[in-house]
């Protein structure tokens, strides 16, 4: 099978990694910005308030999170929106998009515990089922779960693709059915590395189903393809490169996380081709500072004790650390339907 099919089955197939109840954070295989601090989602909540204040979206818009895992970020966004602009809670609509019914039940339990049924949240299993006049859509580490092909180019410029048989990876020549792979490789001068599948289709679904949209996503990768194979496995916070001779794929298949660095140039072009405009592209550090995380921390400093302030200050340092999440993760903001 093509590597993309193997990747898809690993994460989303029967008993796939994301079909299970996997912890994220210290006790899991990896950290996310959401698991590091509530100020990540809280800062996005502030950005939502600012977008509405600037009349980019109406007060009764829909807030949509895609791939919300346990629902922590949605809860953090709601809490900070309520703190900054309480009246918005009564007018906004909230939607979580999640395929896994087990995870949906987990989200419901957490959000009901957090807000005691005072917040009306809709749960949807597929983005195709969303249809609304306006929305703020957010996703964290979504696109690195999109299936990808892996290629390398021979000296003769012949492109080979990765295939998997019995949990062993080898490379074979592309065929006429691999035109997309070859076109993307040529367009972005990818000689070796991953080619993401599905960016264009995802952007098109959003564009077709939502008239007016602000979409913000965080992920890891670089603007241009890195020119090497970044695909790797995470197990208990240990990083195992896909082609490490010590990595036994069958031992990790569906049991550990698998991911790769995305090309933001490819992602941005995909959205532009579907009628979006690019509002901003930056590191996570710059994005969170621009969104107002420092001002939120200052509000906390003025209204809490030193112990509480120090706790959250240390968390925010992790989010902004240039040697870690701050530069490694990028943010891109798209819009459609702005006047």
Image (cartoon, rainbow, N blue to C red):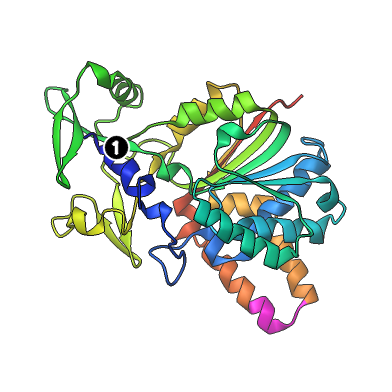
Q: Measured along the vertical axis of the image, is residue 16 above or below residue 53?
A: below
- Give yes or no for residue 69 being in the magenta stretch: no
On the image, the x and y values in percent for residue 33 come to: 53, 59
Going by the image, does 173 lie left or right of 296?
A: left
Picture residue at 39% right of the left edge, 35% below the top? 224
- Give yes or no for residue 305 being in the magenta stretch: yes
Instruction: Return the residue nearer the eye: 168 or 219.
Output: 168
Instruction: Return the residue nearer the eye: 101 or 60.
Output: 101
Q: Which residues are magenta?
A: 304-310
Q: Secondary structure at mark 1?
A: helix
Quarter holding the C terminus? top right
- Judge whether residue 105 can be spotted in this image: yes
Q: Measured along the vertical axis of the image, is residue 85 above or below residue 312?
A: above
Picture residue at 76% right of the left edge, 56% below the top? 119
Circle 1 residue: 5
Q: Residue furthest top?
A: 176
């Amino acid at each position: 099978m093509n590597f993309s099919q193997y990747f898809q089955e690993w994460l989303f197939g029967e008993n796939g990694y994301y079909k299970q109840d996997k912890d994220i954070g210290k006790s899991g295989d990896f950290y996310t910005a959401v698991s590091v601090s509530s100020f990540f989602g809280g800062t996005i909540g502030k950005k939502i308030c600012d977008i509405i204040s600037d009349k980019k979206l109406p007060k009764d818009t829909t807030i949509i999170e895609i791939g919300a895992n346990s629902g922590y970020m949605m809860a953090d966004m709601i809490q900070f929106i309520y703190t900054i602009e309480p009246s918005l809670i009564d007018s906004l609509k909230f939607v979580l998009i999640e395929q896994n019914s087990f995870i949906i039940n987990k989200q419901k339990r957490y959000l009901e515990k957090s807000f005691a049924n005072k917040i009306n949240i809709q749960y949807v299993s597929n983005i195709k089922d969303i249809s609304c006049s306006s929305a703020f859509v957010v996703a964290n580490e979504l696109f690195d779960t999109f299936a990808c092909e892996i290629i390398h180019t021979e000296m003769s410029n012949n492109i080979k693709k990765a295939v998997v048989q019995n949990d062993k990876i080898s490379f074979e020549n592309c065929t006429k059915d691999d035109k997309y792979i070859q076109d993307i490789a040529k367009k972005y001068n990818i000689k070796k590395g991953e080619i993401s599948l599905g960016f264009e289709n995802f952007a098109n679904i959003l564009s077709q189903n939502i008239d007016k949209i602000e979409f913000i996503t965080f992920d890891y990768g670089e603007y241009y393809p890195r020119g090497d194979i970044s695909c790797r496995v995470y197990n208990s916070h240990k990083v195992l490169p896909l082609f490490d001779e010590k990595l036994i794929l069958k031992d990790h298949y569906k049991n550990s996380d698998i991911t790769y660095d995305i090309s933001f140039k490819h992602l941005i072009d995909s959205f532009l081709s579907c009628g979006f405009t690019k509002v901003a592209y930056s590191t996570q550090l710059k994005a969170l500072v621009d969104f107002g995380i420092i001002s939120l921390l200052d509000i906390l400093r003025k209204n809490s004790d030193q112990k509480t302030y120090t706790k959250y200050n240390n968390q925010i340092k992790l989010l902004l650390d240039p040697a870690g999440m701050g530069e490694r993760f990028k943010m891109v903001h798209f819009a459609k339907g702005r006047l």
